[in-house]
Amino acid sequence: MTIRVTRRWRPRSLFQLVLLAFLVVMLPLGVLMFQAAQALSELSRLADVSARQAVEETRRARTLGILALELERSARQYAVVEQESLLDIYVERLGEYRDLLAEQRELLGEEGDVAVLARQLELLERLPELPRELFEQQLAIFPAFAERTESMRRATNRHIDARIETIRERAETVQARLWLQTAALVSASLVLMLLFSWLIIRPVRQLERRILGIGSGAPRSTARPVQGPAELVQLDERLDWLASRLEELEAEKQQFLRHMSHELKTPLASVREGSALLADGVAGELSPPQREILELIDASGGELQRLIEQLLDYNLLQHNRQVTPERLDVATVVREVLAKHRLALANKGMAVSSFDGPLEWSLDHTATSRLLDNLISNAIAYGEDGGVLEIRARRRGDRLEVEVANSGEPIAEADRPRLFEAFYQGQARRKGPLKGSGIGLSVAADCARIQQGQLELVEDPRLAVCFRLTLPAGLHASLPLNPELALEASHPARN
């Protein structure tokens, strides 16, 4: 069958959903990496350009200082020796200084030192045209000229330092922006991761609930269709098909058990009725050996009828897990059950000891009677011939404890973990002509669980086998069995 789920969008496969989740989660991180690379590239380019300019400007300022010294030296040498070559050198260095100063002015602008140097340079350009006396007088300008050149070099250094500081502030701004972007984009990635994890885990948990529902027998109409990738939706459809098949098989099992009980009970009733007629002497008086054989047939027929009823009780408990509590005297319920086994106990030669009432408690009469019936039957089948059967009850706070103990062979340690499993046969051999069904104490355990109680095997200082039933107070009507309890491991007991 196919379940159509209406939605805006759904990935076609789990692989597509995982791939999409990976791409979407990585997208903010990719954007972050791209922006970080762009910012680092910009800072690197800016630092490279600034470094080149700083080297060039520093070299230019240093060259201007050297040219200022060469100008002064060549001028003073010319004043002493009056060689025209020295004047040519002066003019050449002056031109180089003028060109470098023009480039430096583009960097520093019209600062005080640059403007003064420009005016001093105009005076120095007129020196070659002056007479010797004036030429020597104008040589006094060179110390101030050299000082201004040195001041311009220091201004250039300050300008370079200011540019470096600007780059540093820009780097800090970029770093702060990258941290904010990292926090925002990584948070977005985490949110997307949680979103896609939820999209993947949600259908898996829905499938888990479906499986638990199938195991606990919950009706299919209460299950919501799985919404998710196509593989999980298809798996949900397969689970739905499996649930329908299990319901069909369960119905077939119920029908088989009903037919089997009918087919077995009808000839069994005829056998028991015939044995009763023979015992009453309808066909004539019986000899002692014949009567002994007849009693064996009747006892075996009764045992077979009890096994059939146990099987039907087990099947009933698997489907009708509701209780109808009422305020009852526990001692009265125990006496009713013991009355059913009076002949079997007498044939076994067992001494019965039971507690005195009244002891009122809220419990389900049918489930409690069936539980005690199976415990007493178990004691008769496995207990010691001529032994002891004790039934004890006591209050412990808000709980009731009922113990059924008998003498005989202790339960083997290897059997204890599985003795409450249905159809499990332990190592102990059943006394009597028929073999047990292996579901007696499984039915008893279910009767305890549907009343929110517990049946367990406990140690007794005097008797070999002791089962303890613990029931809580305030049992509510029509309380279904918790599905988780149905899946719990069985408590140690014996079938």
Image (cartoon, rainbow, N blue to C red):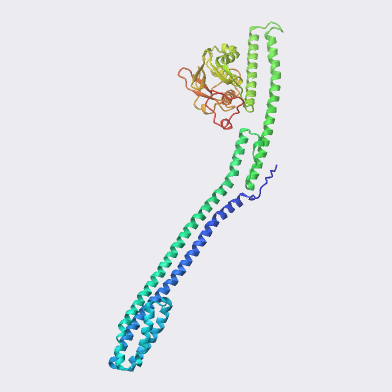
**Image quarter (top left, top right, bottom left or bottom right) of the N terminus:** top right
Q: Is residue 78 visible?
A: no
Q: Front-most of 38 and 147?
A: 147
Q: Position of residue 126 (x, y in %)?
A: 36, 90
Q: Is residue 154 left or right of residue 433?
A: left
153 shown above or below 352? below
What residue is drawn where x is 61% and y is 20%? 366
Residue 242 in percent (x, y) is at: 66, 38
The number of discs equals 0
* Residue 27 point in image, percent of width and height: 55, 57
Quadrant in the picture for residue 113: bottom left
Residue occupying the point 51% across, 60% down: 33
Q: Position of residue 143 (x, y in %)?
A: 30, 82
Q: Quadrant of the C terminus?
A: top right
- Which residue is farthest top? 285
Q: Is residue 218 visible?
A: yes
Q: Residue at x 48, y 18 (%)?
A: 463
